[in-house]
Image: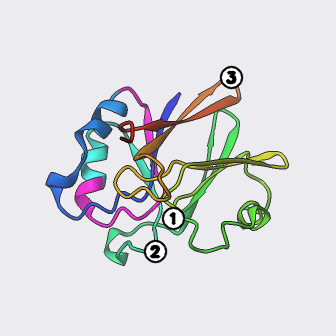
Amino acid sequence: MLVGIVSDTHWTRPEQFDLKLYEMLAEVDQILHAGDVVKPFVLEKLRDLAPVTAVRGNCDPSELGLPDSVTLEWEGITIGMFHGHQVALNFSDDVVDYFDGLADLIIHGHIHVPRRERVGACTVFCPGSPSQPRHSSPPAIGILEIENGRFKLEHRALRVPK
């Protein structure tokens, strides 16, 4: 199973949607959006590519009807996803504790910077932001590959910074 991971899109107009993102997600089976979708058209465009599971970010209106967090189990891997504004993200134990220490993988957004960290038996992952990266990081997404009860993660830059 191949999963695209996106967060912090913050696009407010359809013409802002980055077509490079379409190309990068063309082969995925599922898409996870870790919040700050901002406008419904973002989810609609992503759903043109694959089924989407999304959570509410601190910039998302309640009208989007997104949950604060989700827990998924795919091929024996437990994935917790939330935006991240609910905890102090620099305290990795707080991130893991949010899902009661039961997740193999926790996906979050909010920081707009790619992150991968191992905390005990859990991997904490932020894809970065495809539209508003911070701290000199490139616009980025994540790709998750799950096969035979194991997973691999990678960050992919939408373009190389100049």
For residue 36, which quarter of the picture?
bottom left
> Which residue is at the front of the view, 129 or 2?
129
Q: Which of the two marks, 1 or 3, is nearer to us in this view?
A: 1
For residue 35, which quarter of the picture?
bottom left
Badge 1 marks a residue whose secondary structure is loop
Badge 2 marks a residue whose secondary structure is loop
Residue 75 at x, y = what percent? 65, 32
Q: Is residue 101 above or below residue 23?
A: below
Q: Which residue corresponds to mark 2?
A: 58
Image quarter where the C terminus lies is top left
Sequence-earlier tag: 1 or 3:
1
Q: Residue 110 carries which label?
A: 1
Q: Which residue lies furthest to the right in this view?
A: 120
Q: Distance between the residues labelled 1 and 3?
A: 31 Å
- The disc labelled 2 sits on which kind of residue? Asn
Horizontal side of residue 18 vs 1, given as left or right: left
Q: Residue furthest front?
A: 162
Badge 3 marks a residue whose secondary structure is loop
Q: How far apart are marks 1 and 2 (CA)?
A: 8 Å
- The disc labelled 3 sits on which kind of residue? Asn
Q: Residue at x 38, y 26 (%)?
A: 27
Evaluate if marks 1 and 2 touch, with contact meaning CB atoms under 8 Å apart: yes
Residue 117 at x, y = what percent? 71, 48
In the image, the segment drawn in magenta is 27-42
Q: Which color scheme is applied? A: rainbow
Q: Distance between the residues labelled 2 and 3?
A: 35 Å
Sequence-earlier tag: 1 or 2:
2
Q: Which residue corresponds to mark 3?
A: 148
Specify few, some or many for label 3: CA neighbours under 10 Å numbering under 14, 14-19, or 20 or more.
Answer: few
Q: Which residue is drawn at 45% across and 43% down?
A: 141
